[in-house]
Image: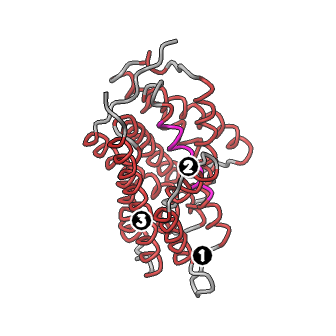
Amino acid sequence: MTARPAPADTPIAGILYRIASVIMFGFMWAAMKLAGENGAKAIEMVFYRGLFGLPIVLAWIAAGPGLATIRPRRPMAHVWRSAIGLTSIVLNFTGLIMLPLADATTIGFTAPIFATILSAMLLREHVGPHRWTAVVVGFIGVVVITRPGGSASLPAIGIVVALLGALGTTGVQITLRQLGATESTGSIVFWFFIGCTVAGGIGTAIWGQMHDAATFGLLLIGAGSGAAGQILMTASLRAAPVGTVAPFDYLQILIAIALGWLIWSTAPPLATIAGAALIAGSGLYTAYREHRLRRESVAATPQG
């Protein structure tokens, strides 16, 4: 079987896709947070996100690349990606239920920190003092956000769940870039939504419950926004490297703060803002260092 050529790098398109993706995910998190306050469980969010989002994904595929593109070339790679993605999204939704929107969103952006740690531990990649410093700064940001011992300390279990969700997000990002070498965007998104629907449906049949029309409406809005965000995020990773587009994810922190103020009339405490600045700075510096090291590596490679 002949592999597809590696995805071409078109940075501007990748960045625009990523910004649109971040906006859609911001709406998804807010809608799911409201649904959670009305009694919806994380596994139900996964199920309805897959069920309601699947028709949107199919319509997009049919109108664009065509339904033939959903045929997988590496089926087991899709199973692995779906398993990581499902675990990650359940953890992220659970953390969202337990924590304020801005705090849950910000903690989710510790993914670059975990990416650095995993690359050193599992891939045996060299990580210099600059990136280790960024890791330490990022974790200081987490400590600042959690406000241990303060009058408004966040629940420890919520923090742990959110951090584990960020760890899962790291695995998803790596897997998506690897899948992009052989699989179409439509195939990657379609099979992930199938996995969400099947696994989420089983979980909902066991632990789910009926909800009122308003809650189902919120789940529908969250599902539609999530489907759009998933399509745009996957497209961004096919258009450009992770290091190029990932820094724009930090716009989601601003979106979460704005939505928290508009919907819940709550401004984030100073600790959240300070911690978000440390985590975002850590992630952006890590992305800059990786870009610089990659550029230096290419320049040092003999030509011809």
The number of numbered badges drawn on the structure is: 3
The image shows residue 206 at horizontal and vertical percentages of 74, 44
Q: Residue at x 64, y 73 (%)?
A: 155
Q: Which residue is mark 3?
A: 280
Magenta segment includes 181? no
The image shows residue 60 at horizontal and vertical percentages of 37, 29
The kind of secondary structure the magenta stretch mainly shows is helix
- CA–CA distance in space, label 3 to label 1: 20 Å
Q: Residue at x 48, y 21 (%)?
A: 70
Q: Amino acid at mark 1?
A: Leu
Q: Are marks 3 and 2 in contact (CB under 8 Å)?
A: no
Q: Residue at x 68, y 67 (%)?
A: 157
* Label 2: how many Cα within 10 Å (few below 14, some 14–19, many 20+): few
Q: Residue at x 66, y 72 (%)?
A: 156
- Badge 1 marks a residue whose secondary structure is loop
Q: Which residue is mark 1?
A: 154
Say left or right for 240 vs 166: left
The image shows residue 132 at horizontal and vertical percentages of 52, 64
- CA–CA distance in space, label 3 to label 2: 23 Å
The residue segment tinted magenta is: 164-177
Residue 70 vertical placement versus 289 (above, below): above
Task: Give the number of the mark in front: 3 or 1.
Answer: 3
Residue 263 vertical placement versus 239 (above, below): below
Q: Quadrant of the C terminus?
A: top left
Circle number at residue 267: none
Which residue in the rendered view is the most extreme toward the right? Answer: 206
- Label whose residue precedes the other's in the sequence (3 or 2): 2
Task: Give the number of the mark in front: 3 or 2.
Answer: 2
Residue 145 vertical placement versus 169 (above, below): below
Which residue in the rendered view is the most extreme toward the top? Answer: 1
Q: How is the image coloured?
A: secondary structure
Q: Which residue is mark 2?
A: 125
